[in-house]
Image (tube, grey):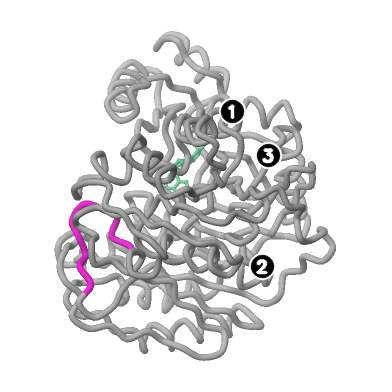
Amino acid sequence: MFSKILIANRGEIAVRVNRACHGLGAQTVAIYSQADKDAMHVREADEAYCVGPGPVGRSYLDVANIVSTALATKCDAVHPGYGFLAENARFAEICSDHGLVFIGPKPSVIAAMGDKATAKRIMKEAGVATTPGSDILESAQKARDAAKRIGYPVLLKATAGGGGKGMRVVERPEDIDRAFASATAEAEASFKDGRLYMEKLLLQPRHVEVQVLGDEFGTVLHLGERDCSVQKPSHQKLIEEAPAPNLTSKQRHALHEMAVKACKSVGYTNAGTLEFLVAGDHVYFMEMNTRIQVEHPVTEMVYGVDLVKEQIRIAAGERAAYVQRDLQARGHAIECRINAENSQNNFAPEAGTVSHVEFPDGPGMRVDSHMYAGALVPPYYDSLLAKIVVHGETRDEAIARMELALRETTIEGVHTTIAQCAEILATREFREGRYDITFLPRLMAGAASR
Ligand code: MV4
């Protein structure tokens, strides 16, 4: 096991990773920006060092400063959390060049999966179902030819993308030129890589993702799936659950088998997530995320596995602590993301000081948060304040428990998504588990017009 781990992150995930490190007997080093000097992750680590001012480019993304801090404090590993440097293959490589274990997959795998067209090609070759589409399109003319073959409507996607940037729906051949130019420009501006590929547009799909863990001895385990279809128009997830409701056992089995097969074919190690779109009876691979995800706790509650501890143990060269048949999903878990944002102001993120907090507690309840009375919410980072996670023997019990948990949650000083989460839980679509990616945008449009 590692003796000291640098946590290259902030917020709730830095607190979460710190807890896992301490649980394994490792010392921790926090890094922080000037804006985070009083943050919970700084207080709870064994050591903490300021790496720069508030803006992320000068602190949490400053590779040289972070690696220097890890070396100066004699760390043997780095946990990147999610966001920031978590899927930066170059960072992973620089860590290992300096004798630091990057707690994640190999840099070559991070790079391959980070390029969405490459990831899709690799998965297709491994026998995983992918959405009908094209490889990289060198020109608008090539795009027109591809669309003719695939059939309209189609979706242009940025290969460097994710999160919807550089994505354009195209309904008719006469719209290809303009969509190709604007998607290329947006991708170029966002990722310094304007390359596009194309897919058949799936109508009203669900976003279902499979959690995997691979060790360095070739074992790949899946830990079931999560439904993350409750997303804002900005592609931010708001509520996630495990298992996904309304999948046939055949679809569920196919998802799990494809995920494991895909990981074995790329020699995947550490924690990862394969994202699929489920449309009608079909499931299609979409993207792979090579990090621990925000919504990992719903999987932890259903499987009774500490995924962050497993990440660390695997990176330290230990064998997976489980075999597949021991991993049995039990009951149902739901997560609500409590963000600092203002529903009166188009859900814009809101900075401020949290004056008062109360969190729920009791059987089947978990809160992952870095909030305390007096905590600052700086303007520079994502607006996640807390994740309220509940478990029940059934989905209905989990929903009832979440309603209780949200009622028992108080955050004063900034506006939050607590009421919006409660509104979603009260809808018939959510209660019946019959929602897709169009659900929350429709609900929000309705609320805006009321
Ligand atoms: C799609 C799709 C429909 N058809 N691909 C959105 C983000 C990006 N990572 C992939 N996305 C989508 N890809 C095909 N072929 C619809 C979306 C999509 C979406 C996917 C998951 C969750 C929420 C979404 C919201 C809008 C669009």
Badges 3 and 1: C-beta atoms under 8 Å apart? no
**Disc 2 marks which amino acid?**
Val
Image coords of residue 278 (percent x, y): 60, 49
* Residue 245 visible within the image: no
What span is colored magenta in the figure? 375-384
Tell me: residue 350, above or below residue 8. Answer: below
Relative to residue 102, is residue 13 drawn left or right? left
Q: Earlier in the sequence, mark 3 or mark 1?
A: 1
Query: Residue 20 placed where, x, y %?
Result: 55, 65
| Nearer the observer, 316 or 60 | 316
Q: Residues within 10 Å of mark 2 (few under 14, many from 20)?
A: some
Most frequent secondary structure within the magenta stretch: loop
Instruction: Say the numbered circle drawn on residue 268.
Output: 3
Residue 269 counted in the magenta span = no
Residue corresponding to mark 1? 108
Residue for point 55% across, 19% down: 135
**Secondary element at tag 3:** loop
Disc 2: residue Cβ within 8 A of ligand 1's nearest atom: no
In the picture, the quarter occupied by the C terminus is bottom left
Mark 3 crowd level (few <14, some 14–19, many ≥20, 10 Å Cα): many
Kind of residue at badge 3: Tyr
Q: Secondary structure at mark 2?
A: loop
Image coords of residue 230 (percent x, y): 44, 60
Residue holding disc 2: 305
At 56% from the left and 84% from the top, the residue drawn is: 364
